[in-house]
C-alpha cells in the first residue's frame, strides 16, 4: 500500500519539555492561550483550570489532526487507556494493537480526522503513532548509531543512576569522553540533520559556537543537572524511544490528564502561519508559546515578528520563545525581557537544546 499517510507527520512526540510553560501557567493563570501546536504534546498540557480559550496553530493540517486526536483521548479515555493508546512507557513494548483499535473506534472525532487516522492505522496495523513522526524516526536512527559507537554497557550505566550527584561523578570521571565527542562530531551537524530530516531547510545557525560546541555544552548541562532516565529527550537520543517510565513527558502524567479532562476550555485548531494569524488581531491572548518557529525566520520577519503580533496581545501578556542554534535579531520594543524570573525552571528543563527567551508585553 502506498505510504500516503505514514509519511505526513513531522512530530508525533515532540522535542520540547513543556514543563516550563506548564509551571509558568500554574502561577500566571492566563485565561486565553495561544500555542504552536506541534504534536499536541507541547500545546495541550498548557490547559489549566483558569483557561477559557486556547488556540493551537500550525502550518500542518496533519499536526493539527494529531493534536485533535490527542485532545479527544484526554477527554474520553481513562489515564491508563490513554497511556496504552499512545504507547507511552510502560505500554510501548507489548503489542496493544487490538486494544488500540477498540479504543480508537470508541472515539468521536471530526470526519476528516477520523478518516486520516483510520487510513493511517490501517497502514501501520494499529501500532502506536508515538514514534512515527519524521523527527522521532530520525532519532531512532541516531540512537542506533550512538549504540554502536558508545556500546550498550556505557548507555545502560548512564541511565542507571537515581541520584544526580552519582550520575555527575560517573559522567565526569568514567564516561568515555573521547567516544562521546566522536558521536557528537559525527552526528551533531548540519549535513546529518539535512540528510535525515530537514531536506536542506535546517536552521541557518548564527550562534557563535560550532555545532559540536553547541551540542556538547547542551548535553553537558543535561548530564550534570537532569537524571538521564528522567529526560524523555535523552531516552530518545540513546534508545530511540522512552525506555524508563520516569522519562515519560509531562503530557502523559496523570496530573496533566486530569487537568485537561476536567477543563471546559474552548480548544480551537487553526491551520495558518502563526504570524499571519497573530497579526490579524482576531483574538487577544494572555500567554503565547511560540516554540522554536522564529529560529527559522531570518531577514525582516526575524526582526519584526514581535511587533507584528502586538495586536493579538493583552497588556502584560507573556511570550515564550525557544531559540535553536540561532540568536534572532528581534526588535523587542514594547516588551520587557523577563527570562531571568524563570531561571530555576530553565535550569531544570529536560531538553537543554534551546535558548529560551521570555518576554512580557508592556503596551
Ligand atoms: C517548529 S516545530 C518544532 C517541534 C516542536 N519543538 C515540538 O516539540 O513539537 C513545531 C511546529 O511548528 C509548525 N510550524 C512551523 N512554522 C510555522 C509557522 N510559521 N506557523 C505555524 N506553525 C508553524 C510545524 O508544522 C511544527 O508542527
Image (cartoon, rainbow, N blue to C red):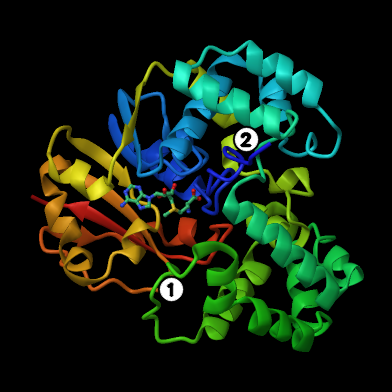
* The image quarter in which residue 26 lies: top left
Question: Which of disc 2 and disc 1 is earlier in sequence?
Answer: 2
Residue with the mark numbered 2: 252
Residue 272 shown left or right of residue 205 in the figure: left
Give the quarter of the figure containing the N terminus.
top right
Vertical placement of residue 310 versus 92, above or below: below
Query: How far across and how far down the image is residue 357, in percent?
Result: 34, 62
Vertical placement of residue 81 versus 222, above or below: above
Query: How far across and how far down the image is residue 62, in percent?
Result: 47, 37
**47 vs 34, nearest the viewer:** 34
Q: What SS does tag 1 mark? A: loop
Residue with the mark numbered 1: 325
The residue shown at (59%, 53%) is 134
The residue shown at (65%, 40%) is 130
Q: Residues within 10 Å of mark 2 (few under 14, many from 20)?
A: some
* The image quarter in which residue 128 lies: top right
Vertical placement of residue 210 versus 8, above or below: below
**282 vs 46, nearest the viewer:** 282
User: Extreme left residue here?
Assistant: 363
The residue shown at (71%, 79%) is 183
Q: Residues within 10 Å of mark 1 (few under 14, many from 20)?
A: many
> Can residue 110 be seen in this snapshot?
no
The response on whether ligand 1 sits within 8 Å of label 1 is no
Amino acid at each position: 500500500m502506498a505510504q500516503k499517510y505514514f509519511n505526513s507527520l513531522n512530530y508525533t512526540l515532540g522535542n520540547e519539555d513543556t514543563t516550563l510553560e506548564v509551571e509558568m501557567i500554574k502561577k500566571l493563570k492566563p485565561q486565553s492561550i495561544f500555542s504552536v501546536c506541534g504534536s499536541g504534546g507541547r500545546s495541550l498540557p498548557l490547559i489549566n483550570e483558569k483557561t477559557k480559550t486556547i488556540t493551537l496553530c500550525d502550518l500542518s493540517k496533519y499536526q493539527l489532526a494529531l493534536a485533535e486526536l490527542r485532545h479527544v483521548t484526554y477527554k474520553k479515555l481513562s489515564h491508563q487507556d490513554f497511556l496504552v493508546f499512545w504507547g507511552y512507557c510502560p505500554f510501548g513494548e507489548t503489542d496493544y494493537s487490538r486494544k488500540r483499535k477498540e479504543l480508537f473506534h470508541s472515539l468521536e472525532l471530526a470526519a476528516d480526522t477520523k478518516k486520516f487516522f483510520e487510513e493511517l492505522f490501517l497502514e501501520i496495523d494499529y501500532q502506536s503513532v508515538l514514534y512515527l513522526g519524521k523527527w522521532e524516526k530520525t532519532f531512532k536512527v541516531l540512537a542506533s548509531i550512538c549504540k554502536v559507537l558508545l556500546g550498550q554497557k556505557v548507555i545502560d550505566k548512564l541511565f542507571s543512576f537515581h541520584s544526580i550527584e552519582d550520575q555527575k561523578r560517573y559522567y565526569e570521571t568514567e564516561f568515555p569522553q573521547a567516544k562521546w565527542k566522536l558521536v557528537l562530531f559525527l552526528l551533531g551537524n548540519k549535513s546529518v540533520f539535512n540528510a535525515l530530516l530537514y531536506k536542506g531547510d535546517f536552521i541557518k545557525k548564527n550562534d557563535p559556537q560550532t555545532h559540536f560546541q553547541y551540542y556538547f555544552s547542551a548535553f553537558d548541562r543535561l548530564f550534570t543537572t537532569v537524571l538521564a532516565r528522567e529526560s524523555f529527550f535523552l531516552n530518545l537520543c540513546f534508545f530511540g524511544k522512552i525506555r524508563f517510565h520516569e522519562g515519560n513527558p509531562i503530557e502523559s502524567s496523570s496530573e496533566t490528564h486530569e487537568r485537561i479532562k476536567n477543563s471546559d476550555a474552548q480548544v480551537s485548531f487553526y491551520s495558518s502561519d502563526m504570524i499571519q494569524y497573530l497579526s490579524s488581531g482576531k483574538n487577544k491572548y494572555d500567554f503565547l508559546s511560540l516554540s522554536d518557529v522564529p529560529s527559522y525566520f531570518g531577514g525582516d520577519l526575524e526582526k519584526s515578528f514581535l511587533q507584528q503580533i502586538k495586536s493579538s496581545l493583552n497588556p502584560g501578556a507573556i511570550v515564550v520563545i525557544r531559540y535553536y542554534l540561532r540568536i534572532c535579531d528581534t526588535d523587542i520594543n514594547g516588551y520587557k525581557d523577563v527570562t531571568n524570573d524563570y531561571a530555576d525552571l530553565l535550569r531544570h528543563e529536560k531538553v537543554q537544546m534551546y535558548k529560551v527567551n521570555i518576554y512580557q508585553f508592556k503596551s
